[in-house]
Amino acid sequence: FCTDRDSERSSRMGVSGGPPNRKAMLTNPAQLRKYVQRCMRKLLEKSLMTDDPKIQEQREIDFAWAMAEWRTFDPTSPMKAFPPGDGTNSKDPSALELLIILLKRSSSSDVHYACCASIAYLAVRPDVRSALVETPSGPLMESLDLFVRRLEATDSPGVRYALCAIASELCKCDAGLIRLRDINFAQALERLRQKKSLPKDPALEMIIDHLVQELRPRIA
């Protein structure tokens, strides 16, 4: 999901927007799970919260990429590894719910990029796809509508690619196809294509063509 411009920006800005540039990348699933839980606590526990918007933004980015890293090395379902109420507060959201919450409330394109890329990695799993399209209440209920809003509002190539990757995964299940058609995701892609302010991107054009074809209703 990382474009050349995103890669260059990440190298200039360290962990901002792109994956963390830690000296020793964690690969042990148990250590990664603890790291994700620490990132979540910094966002959810009142005693650890910050009023500094830059620090808050970085914490949100760190959490999103921590989830992507964890998914790379641990085959466990995130629904089981990081369920709702997994921390000190029984009302805490699950890790997947927290990604959606951050994507909704943040105005930072770097946070949007990190959250969308992480969700795309997680959506490879059928249970995650089901949670995104079939959950009847809570933060996940509005996931797909949120994806459309972010797709139409963003100027970030990374966010566009990551959202298209999420849609590609959701197309793998019947419920995902139905929901994407219900919210007119194909039309949102066409509106994106017609934006004159966007530079030509042949790779994105190919992805949009594929998704529009996938989302076209089948005639029996």
Image (cartoon, rainbow, N blue to C red):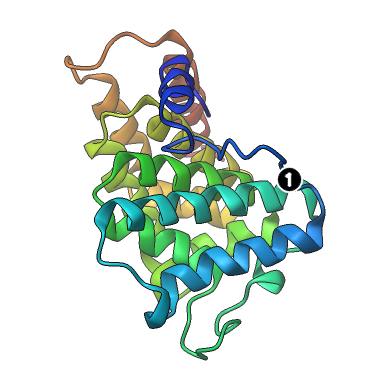
Toward the front, the furthest residue is 23
The residue lying at 39 percent from left, 31 percent from top is: 160
- Number of callouts in the render? 1
Q: Is residue 180 left or right of residue 106?
A: right
- Is residue 198 depicted above or below 81 in this figure? above
Q: Quadrant of the C terminus?
A: top right
The residue lying at 45 percent from left, 18 percent from top is: 8
Q: Give the residue type that dot 1 points to.
A: Thr
The one nearer the camera, 119 or 14, is 14
Q: Is residue 137 visible?
A: no
The residue lying at 36 percent from left, 40 percent from top is: 110
Q: Position of residue 131 (x, y in %)?
A: 56, 66
Q: Quadrant location of residue 72? A: top right
Q: Position of residue 126 (x, y in %)?
A: 69, 56
The residue lying at 59 percent from left, 43 percent from top is: 169
Crowd tier of the residue under label 1, counting other residues whose Cα lies within 10 Å: few below 14, some 14–19, many 20 or above: few
- Is residue 195 depicted above or below 111 in this figure? above
The one nearer the camera, 190 or 49, is 49
**According to the image, label 1 marks what residue?**
72
Toward the left, the furthest residue is 196
Q: Position of residue 161 (x, y in %)?
A: 45, 29
Label 1 element class: helix
- Is residue 32 depicted above or below 216 in this figure? below
Q: Is residue 57 visible?
A: yes
